[in-house]
Amino acid sequence: MAFSLQQLQDRADIEMVLIQYCRFIDRVDLDALAALFTTDCFVEYGPDANFSSQGRAKLRRDLERMWRYRRTAHQMSNIEVSFKGADEAHVLSSVIAWHERPEDQNREVVVLYGRYDDTLVRTPQGWNIRRRKLMNAGGDRVFESTIFPCERMPAPAGWAWPPQTA
């Protein structure tokens, strides 16, 4: 697939938004984090209404829950960008999100391996996230019931492991 020079620049700018998201959520810099989203954004961190946010202001308030962790480390990879015109992009990316609970909870560590399904749009301020959905690819049990499962192809009919020998 060939990209134009503008698309290469846009891709770099979009990747920077995702990198900044990780940095800002780990610092719990909620104002900077919220500024990465459009004012009318819709974000789903899980199917429960408590994990969905409509609008930048509500997202900022909802992400105050990140203060419950002593520290976090979010790592983004496998970024796929598909342009839907000059000012919109569909972006899939993988995330490893490490969370350390506070000392009164024995500093328990919980980890999520997930995937973000995003729509970003070009705004006067640059690229912003309009829609985000987090999907769970694995991790600790605490996240199993609170996050959408990643989509996965079913095994073909008759497939078994270990393979059956004749």
Image (spheres, rainbow, N blue to C red):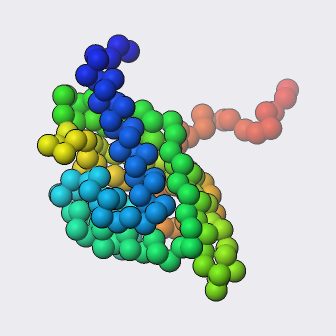
Quarter of the picture containing the C terminus is top right
- Residue drawn at 66 percent across, 35 percent down: 158
Q: Is residue 105 left or right of residue 132?
A: right
* Residue at (38% x, 74% y) in the render: 64
Residue most extreme to the right:
166
- In which quarter of the view is residue 50 placed? bottom left
Say which of 36 and 45 sits in front. 36
Residue 92, percent from left and from top = 41, 40
Q: Position of residue 44 (x, y in %)?
A: 35, 60
68 left or right of 131 in image: right
Q: Is residue 142 visible?
A: no
**Which residue is the extreme one toward the top?**
2
Q: Is residue 9 left or right of residue 114?
A: left
Viewer-proximal residue, 70 or 153? 70
Taking the spot 20% from the left edge, 39% from the top edge, the residue there is 122
Residue 148, compared with residue 86, is above or below; it is below
Location of residue 36 in the rendering, given as x and y in whole percent from the top left corner: 29, 52
Q: Is residue 18 above or below residue 13?
A: below
Q: How many marks?
A: 0
Pick out the residue farthest to the bottom. 104
The residue depicted at 48 percent of the width and 47 percent of the height is 115
Quadrant of the snapshot with the N terminus = top left
Q: Position of residue 34 (x, y in %)?
A: 29, 60
Quadrant assignment, res 139: bottom right
Nearer to us in this view, 104 or 47: 104
Residue positioned most to the left: 124
Answer whether residue 97 is visible to the viewer in this image. yes
* Figure quadrant of residue 63: bottom left
